[in-house]
Amino acid sequence: MKNKVNRELPDEILKTTGYKPFESVEVKDLVIERVSAKVRQSVKPNKLVDSLEEVVLKTVKDGMTISFHHHFREGDYVFNKVMRIIIDHGFKDLRIAPSSLTNVMNDILVEAIEKGVVTNITSSGMRGTLGDVVSHGALKNPVIFRSHGGRARAIETGEIHIDVAFLGTPNADEMGNANGMDGKAPFGSLGYALMDAQYADTVVAITDSLVSYPNTPASIKQTQVDYVVKIDAVGNPDKIGAGATRFTKDPKELKIASMVNDVIVNSPYFKNGFSFQTGTGGAALAVTRFLRQSMIDHNVKATFGLGGITKPMVDLLEEGLVDKLMDVQDFDGGSAQSMHLNKNQQEIDASWYADPANKGAMVDKLDVVILSALEIDTKFNVNVMSGSDGVIRGAIGGHQDAGTAKLTIISAPLVRGRIATVVPDVTTVITPGDSIDVLVTEIGIAINPKRTDLLDKLSNIPGLPVYTIEELQKIAEEKLGKPEPLEFTDKVVALIEYRDGSLLDIIREVKD
Amino acid sequence: MKNKVNRELPDEILKTTGYKPFESVEVKDLVIERVSAKVRQSVKPNKLVDSLEEVVLKTVKDGMTISFHHHFREGDYVFNKVMRIIIDHGFKDLRIAPSSLTNVMNDILVEAIEKGVVTNITSSGMRGTLGDVVSHGALKNPVIFRSHGGRARAIETGEIHIDVAFLGTPNADEMGNANGMDGKAPFGSLGYALMDAQYADTVVAITDSLVSYPNTPASIKQTQVDYVVKIDAVGNPDKIGAGATRFTKDPKELKIASMVNDVIVNSPYFKNGFSFQTGTGGAALAVTRFLRQSMIDHNVKATFGLGGITKPMVDLLEEGLVDKLMDVQDFDGGSAQSMHLNKNQQEIDASWYADPANKGAMVDKLDVVILSALEIDTKFNVNVMSGSDGVIRGAIGGHQDAGTAKLTIISAPLVRGRIATVVPDVTTVITPGDSIDVLVTEIGIAINPKRTDLLDKLSNIPGLPVYTIEELQKIAEEKLGKPEPLEFTDKVVALIEYRDGSLLDIIREVKD
């Protein structure tokens, strides 16, 4: 059958998984009987365990679901250290459920897959060699890709039941009180990991800086932690910052950023009290810079900035241009450092950030978001997961979640080298076109036809040519020609959940 | 049958309630399958409801369990306003499960009991007219008294399932983000209410100060709140402070406080890195003052102060004599105000404070606690619940919980007027004698015989006469004579839980 984004979902998959096909980006009337952790009381004077090996052997069993967070990003040491022990001890059939996977985790996870140690993965995304082997059918069962909000929801409903969470933190005390702010490898908000800390049956806090008891502020609390292990180093601070921390100098990116700013400023949402999420990378930082100037010029202030927080957003907070930063993760040292210095930079967990099955997520209140795309099609469906070769090389992140904002802007070049961004049909649907309002490319913008109000507002803005998305697609195609269609086998290698837990798309094995 | 504190527990009660008799103050090997809230998704742009009446009618049904917190203490307006509506609309058979009950709640609750609106109560305690009518059999079913930690445990296990929590806060935004620190009637830590916010199926935030969204710091989070109601006033700030905020000038109290200090200083626990809970009231403040001087004189610093926090404890924090204050409630304006100014004053919930069924409560790490007593008997059992006339007029509070400290000191006068404090058998056992280490009275101290180590340390301290508890009891009895034995009917009006959920004692109806 085909779901509402016209994706063919094999009956076999629907039958064996029990997924409902994706219906609508309007997620409503959910009633969730939340699950909770199985808690073993501890009255030990401390929870210290001598070694990571000891705690892995104490806690892990074949077939379990184990989790990690990705707040250390490419500087993460914890995933490799834990997985090394797990592989060397010959555990089998593990399910891993990290908040996401970064490149530094690839080699060891490929090894774990090849050895049958890991047979199930749920993640926000994957890239590099891992995406490659998974796309070629190496994993026993399909990966389940979930957005950050979707993961929070799945943990709360029990769809993800974490047996053991291995949570690296740059500090912890002997009872497990920990935060992400202080220590040798600080990363700021523990937003994603807070879900694991609350819901995992067994929580292992791993740190390289054992601090005196009681450690405050305690983002992860001793009431949640079973074991504490001190290791030499939990992460490389130089590699924690995600992507660019300087504004882009690429003229094409600057042009797009400037047009994104024009779209925002001329939209009905740019007014006192608005809210926004800009994201990371050189182009996103450029958007934040342009937006800052617009806010000053128009005397407009924002109530909150959301999501992955960057130093330029902290600057807005400190300048009084935004009242609060709601911080689920920090993308650079500047924002990580400032969280415990400024009470208006509030740490939020992934549920609060984006879970559709709670009593109100931040994304529900979001006015403006700027998101990226590997591909966007003429139905405005966006792909941030699979490349033009069909290989997995991306992550949902908060894309589906923040896509629910009142004004969702996709910022993307029309083409990247020999590859079109605007296409007739995306390879994989990650965020349905119904969520997307405006596409901004270097040659102009396209507005989702259902947003007739925006068409009115954004037409006839100097320097902001308006195309239909079909026109943009044609221009891209005229430049590059039609690509050869991709070839896939029948094997399903990944399932794409929508944030409400319905089945949005599948990814098939790449045929070489 | 009799339990391990020699209390006769009627078979009928054990059979109908399923309680296990109290066995030991060593609570261990608990494994809890925690429950969780039933969550109805909200995507409303705000959660505001026009009136308290509207929200009561939307949420409350006959037979439900509804809860409140007591952080406003004698300044609370919320309980009365909600209960007035509930009574006037003729609801029946409600179970109420507040964190505790203060005197300002008595009249309306007596009315609710008499009208059959409330038929079950679980609380930390009760006093005044309410305690009187309950002691005389007015409530349909026995009250269940639980310690603060025991309530947290019972909520987490589902023994208390809260249908609707009515949580007054001195501020909230339109989505329910709230804290106890800012506004017209601030009380500081929301420690007890955080349990209700997390576990109640429906949470109503009630405030008199609607602040701009998003409100930070958010102790109660929008992910937990279903409705927000603005009312004229949530509390009287002048009556929030509990008891004395000045040091006592009563020579007897000062003498006891000084001896308490001598016991601490001469104990093995008074050393760098120790921790303590001193509590509230003029005498407790005096202990804190003496302790402060001792810490300066001996160059001893504490790692944390725990529990109900007072301004003198904040002074210790600011002087650097204690590293952290772990704050489940604030007893005066000074401590309430300082919480968001000092990151070393950490808000903790009741589970973290004292729940024996989590992965480690603060009380498990507590070295020294000073507690009060209405009665203490020759087995060191303590009663803080029923008066010498058998009438309920007290609260467990954190007594059982903090009683697990390494050095538990009871500070109490030998007699109060014509009533002995040290007695052959307490009327009601609230904290078992096995938890108690030292009794300090104005004429001297008694040491629990099982603490032979303390007997060695505390004998021969100038100004600190050591008696046996039997000697102290005899002295009291010689002063006052033997009281007439109390007369009770067979009807059980209250059950006393130990913090692990076992049945510690019962209270029978007073025979007049």
Image (spheres, coloured by chain):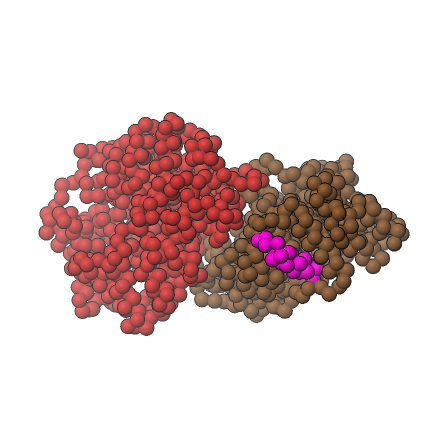
Chain colours: A brown, B red
**Residue A82 location (% of width, % of height):** 61, 62
Q: Is residue B311 above or below residue B134?
A: below
Q: Is residue B470 above or below residue A26?
A: below
Res A91 visible: no
The C terminus of chain A lies in quadrant = bottom right
How many numbered discs?
0
**Residue B461 location (% of width, % of height):** 20, 68
Point 76% across, 53% down: residue: A463
The N terminus of chain A lies in quadrant = top right
Point 73% across, 43% down: residue: A455
Point 32% across, 27% down: residue: B115
By secondary structure, the bulk of the magenta-drawn segment is best described as helix
Residue A93 is a magenta residue: no
Residue A288 is a magenta residue: yes
Per the rendered image, the range of residues in magenta is A281-301
Res A317 visible: yes
Between B124 and B476, the residue placed more toward the observer is B124
